[in-house]
Amino acid sequence: SQQGEEDPQALSIQEGENATMNCSYKTSINNLQWYRQNSGRGLVHLILIRSNEREKHSGRLRVTLDTSKKSSSLLITASRAADTASYFCATGSGGSYIPTFGRGTSLIVHP
Amino acid sequence: NAGVTQTPKFQVLKTGQSMTLQCAQDMNHNSMYWYRQDPGMGLRLIYYSASEGTTDKGEVPNGYNVSRLNKREFSLRLESAAPSQTSVYFCATQGRTPYEQYFGPGTRLTVT
């Protein structure tokens, strides 16, 4: 069963704009990850944020985590057409080390 | 390094036919996973193998079997395919960093 729920389901922006997508979850977590999936490809791990961290950066990506609200956001700054993809959040909890994936946000960046 | 490879890339089966999806990795990872991805459903875990010689059921194991042939290979078998098994199947591995998974390119399966 899905733990994380991404919002919005779909996002369409112009190149150069920032893209923000959100993930909400229901139970306590150890960490939260974001993955990207280009059309017809497998998922690629982008970033992991631990439950004791509030913000993390990687290049043009900025991830925040608010455990009190059980939510996370992924910000892609100065988006490019190549950022067009689906983005999934995945939560990690307990001791199984297996992430639980959400349904994803489809991002389209128009050149 | 090829990473995670899957064969075949595409397959069409008739209801009742059987087939095996192959997955191989050269990352020397202990853990391997099989997921299915359906529109609007995200990824659902079918089976996983924490190490060579062990396999465990995931969220949706019915209708599937797996074999962890060795450390490199993890196969998924459909004994009697059903239209409900039409999906894209992904194999993934996980190394020493918990939760960080590496995915293969997927197999798109259609059952008619």
Image: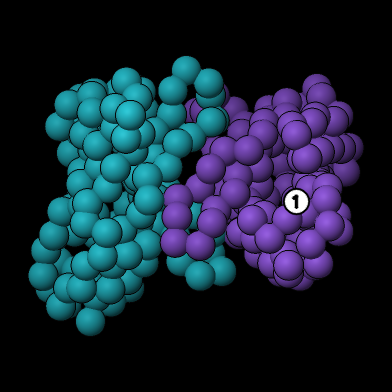
Residue positioned 78% across, 40% down in the render: A60
* Residue farthest along the front direction in this orientation: A111
B37 or B102, which lies in front?
B102
Mark 1, residue position? A23
| Chain under callout 1 | A
Instruction: Classify A40 as above or below B39.
Output: above
Instruction: Examine the image and state in which quarter residue A99 appears.
Output: top right
Q: Colour of chain A?
A: purple
Chain shaded cyan: B
Task: Identify the residue at image location x=67%, y=31%.
Answer: A48
Q: Position of residue B23 (x, y in %)?
A: 25, 42
Q: Residue at x 35, y 54 (%)?
A: B106
Q: Is residue B84 above or below residue B71?
A: below
Q: Nearer the viewer, residue A25 or A61?
A: A61
Q: Nearer the viewer, residue A35 or A96?
A: A35
In the image, residue B51 above or below residue B111: above
| Residue at screen point 17% across, 73% down | B13
Q: Is residue B41 left or right of residue B53?
A: right
Residue furthest to the bottom in view is B112
Q: Amino acid at mark 1?
A: Cys
Q: Is residue B5 visible?
A: yes
Res. A90 in view: no
